[in-house]
Image (cartoon, helix red, strand yellow):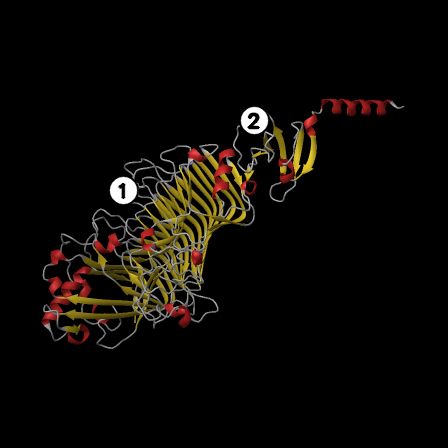
Amino acid sequence: MPKSYIVVGWMLGWMLFCTPAWAQTERTTLRAMLALKTPSSQKTYLVTDVGKEGEWRYDPSDKDSPANGGTVLESANRAVQGRFKRQFDPSAGVHLDWFLDKSMVTINGALLEAVKVSERVNFGPKVYVIAPMVLTPDALWSPQRLRLHFQNTTLQAQSGVKVVKILELQDITELTLSGGVFLDGNVKKAQITQPLNEGGNAFLTIVAPSNRATSRLEIGSLTIQNMPMCGVNIVTHNDEMDEGYRRVLVKAFREINGYNGLNIQNDGFAVWGFNVKGAHRSVVIDSLYALQDNEPWGDAPIEKSFYTFTFENQVDPQVHKRKDTLYIKNLYAKYPCSLILYTQAVNNVLIDNYVMDGVLRKPAVTDEKAYPTMLRKNLSWVGSKHTWTSFKSPKSSFRVKKLRIQNTNKVFMSESSISDITGLWLNKGITGALFDSIETDVRIKLHGDGYYFGFPNVPDGRHRVGTFISHIPAKRNYVQPLSADLTIDKLHIGNGSGVIFAMGNAKIGSITQDNDSRGIFESRENRFKNTDMLYNGFIVDKCQATDILWRFNWFVNQKQLTDEATVQAGERYEFKNFTGNNYLESHTTFTAANETSSYVTAYRYDGDATIQRNVEQFLQFVEFNWTNVKMKLIDGAPSNFARRFMPTKYTEKPLLLNLSRKPRPVKGWKMDWKTSVFTQCVIE
């Protein structure tokens, strides 16, 4: 016999000698295993029941461990006193199906047993029915950690539930919801009789442990659907004082016609899809996605208090000397009809890509059928609203790298529509926001209430846009405001654009234009603010126009001019290097002190000394500083008042704008009064 055969035989014999007897396996079923009269502690029982598969061993020394249906079982034979114990890899966790049996209507009992024996619970790719329940550290195998792993799993609220809140996970320091899960509110079978009493509750509520430096929340892909009201709340115990999770990491939050299935339409009653609230140190989200082509409340006859994704931090920065951040890599909203994104008092916000596509559209449904109410009422829709980012936090930041709003329903953006449509609004208390690129067919409001209503000590404005491409059409009583110390490096008036740009205190580096577009820039008051202005008026460094109208509409009120020291508004226009087809129009209306008589000054100026005196008094607060500007008068008739203050080829008398300036009033936006200057300008 060859020596190699002897060696192999010796090794096999040694392995058999060293292998314990329990390494022998026996294929069986759970029912057969539990019916054994003399189970062996030296065997491994390989159970083959679907959903219950796994290895089991019999422990005759354990007569006390309670059976839990999944990892510990008692024999059906009373003479067998030991316990059958499942063998599993703790790192892989347990499977929820191990703990379920056919008599269970919901997964609640099984889930409570599963989290007692492992920090990881796995769910299968199917629908699990769940009733309202709460999980706290006391119920967990590892009080500090819990991981629920899903595989395209659906958690569906039990039929007949009377409340909105279904699952609450509370005070878990390291919490993970991995994989993909659908939360189904089962709204058609819910029995919520007093929905307004459920305000603020959501299907899933995650309450962060208070002030834990190592706390962490991770979520895979989470989708809400068929929610009676709200979908997800991630909160703290005390939103004004507590620190929440140190880190929140999310692969995707998805809403597919998913919330407010009860169709609550009540002014002042807010409903949302996802709400992350409290001082969570860092929130990083790979993707936010919303599809809203079939929301039951899409045509709600109220100012829409529906929020898809909200992020709120109400902690006073003076309490916690740190900065909280929100980083969203991609946000895509298809057919949005709600307020998609809302942030409040998050110290640092960064969004890489933000797209709203098909605003207020319902594909394959006529507008008359989809929006019968909105077509007849003056409703307000705001796609994205952000407020209080910098309040009491001067080093905060707000940045969107790329914002695009496209394919907006034209029926709401026409001259016949009176609905107020705003794509994004930087509201009160935000300073120095940065947009690398904006391309939109809906107005953007880059100023807050503080600017217009004078709230004391509320900073806002001084925002900056790299490239702003406008496809905003002409619309009745609708303007794109350029104010609040806004800076735009490049403004391009793209195809389809016809909106009026309202000139406030702002600076534009260059203006360009497509051939099939029209631009209108109209004068607006620059209201006084209790902070220093960055720009002294409306400034344009370069303009290459194909069809732009510059319109100066002034309303001179005699009563407001009686005390110059009380004047809180003024206008200044600094233009350079204007070429192409730039057109000039002016219209001035005078209102007498009784505020009942109004006159177009162009027709009354020469023969009315009172009008002359008050118009000249008003022009003390208007200044032009133009260099190398080429323009054409819309109307070259002698009645055109522009000939009174512009150096046109028709002008004969001294310009009214060259009248001597008075000292700066006690209040006012202007840095100082200067005589208007026109250098190398051609106005014909």
Mark 2 and mark 1 residues within 8 Å of each other at the beta carbon: no
At numbered mark 2, what does the secondary structure look like: helix, strand or loop?
A: loop
Image side of residue 395 versus residue 157, left or right: left
x and y percent of residue 379 in the render?
Answer: 32, 65
The answer to whether any part of residue 289 appears in the image is: no
Picture coordinates of residue 54, whole percent (x, y): 63, 37
Helix, strand or loop at disc 1?
Answer: loop
What amino acid type should be assigned to the residue bearing mark 2? Answer: Asp
Residue 593 shows in this picture: yes
Which residue type carries mark 1? Lys
Q: Position of residue 682 (x, y in %)?
A: 30, 67
- Circle 1 packing at 10 Å, graded few (<14), some (14-19), many (20+), is some
Q: Which of the labelled discs sits on residue 62, or is there none?
A: 2
Q: Which quadrant of the figure contains the C terminus? A: bottom left
Which residue has dot 1 on it?
Answer: 392
Q: With respect to residue 327, does 368 lie above or below?
A: below
Task: Say which label, 2 or 1, has the lower sequence index.
Answer: 2
Which residue is more in the foreground, 615 or 391? Answer: 391
Q: Which residue does the image show at 56% across and 26% down from the upper left?
A: 62
